[in-house]
Image (spheres, rainbow, N blue to C red):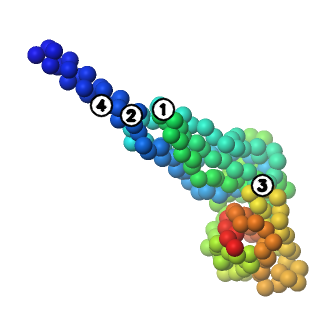
Amino acid sequence: MKQLIILVLFIFCAFGSFAKTNDSLPPQITLNGATSMVICQWGKYIDPGYTLTDKYFALIDIKIDSVGFPINTNNPGLQKIQYKATDKSGKYAFSETRYIMVYPSYSINCGGPGYPTDTTGHSSAIKPNMNLDKNIEIYPNPSSGSIYISMKSHLEISSVSIYNINGQIVSHKNASDLSFSKGQLDITDQPNGIYFARIEMEGGNFVKKLVLRK
């Protein structure tokens, strides 16, 4: 009887080891929170993190690496974070990329009254775009290069800047620009990929992710 129990335990352990070494699926890692966020210069960025699952391995045995972390809020511009999960069998998966726009400290979105500040007096909270997403429509998205902006409120746009994923401005229009009088921008000269439209207006700033697909 004792020998039988030992044999059963041996088979169980061997099967478990076989299942793990023959794991055909990588871990699954997804971002918590939004894939695009904004924060003021010098603010303290706290990433919402990720959710990790795996069919075979314990989560404690999965290695997590991050690309682009920590976010440097000293420098205004576009930054990004991505996570990589690797299990013990060597299989890995990447999360989506989270894009973080760092606003200059002098921008309207960082200096307005009522915004929370940290102990140094700098605005530090990630702003929720002040419900402007309900009042601004950017279309089509994905776009082949011609982008239209429609306002659903009385707010006036002062300027629009389009950033690529490297944080470089590829297009900028002021409200006084004749070609922008109908709320149209043209980035057909840019390669396919992900861009961000930053709209400055009297009520604050609004950031929207765009996909260029020609």
Q: Secondary structure at mark 2?
A: helix
* Quarter of the figure that contains the N terminus: top left
Q: Which residue is mark 2?
A: 20
Q: Residue 200: give x, y in percent of width and height.
A: 79, 68
Q: Which residue is mark 3?
A: 166
Q: Which residue is mark 1?
A: 88
> Residue placed farthest to the left in the image?
1
**Foreground mark, 3 or 1?**
1
Amino acid type of the residue that numbered disc 1 sits on in the rendered structure: Lys
Amino acid type of the residue that numbered disc 2 sits on in the rendered structure: Lys
* Quarter of image, res 201: bottom right
* Quarter of the figure that contains the C terminus: bottom right
CA–CA distance between discs 3 and 2? 39 Å
CA–CA distance between discs 3 and 1? 33 Å
Q: Residues within 10 Å of mark 4 (few under 14, many from 20)?
A: few
Q: Does 53 sit left or right of 116 as displayed? A: left
Q: Which residue is mark 4?
A: 15
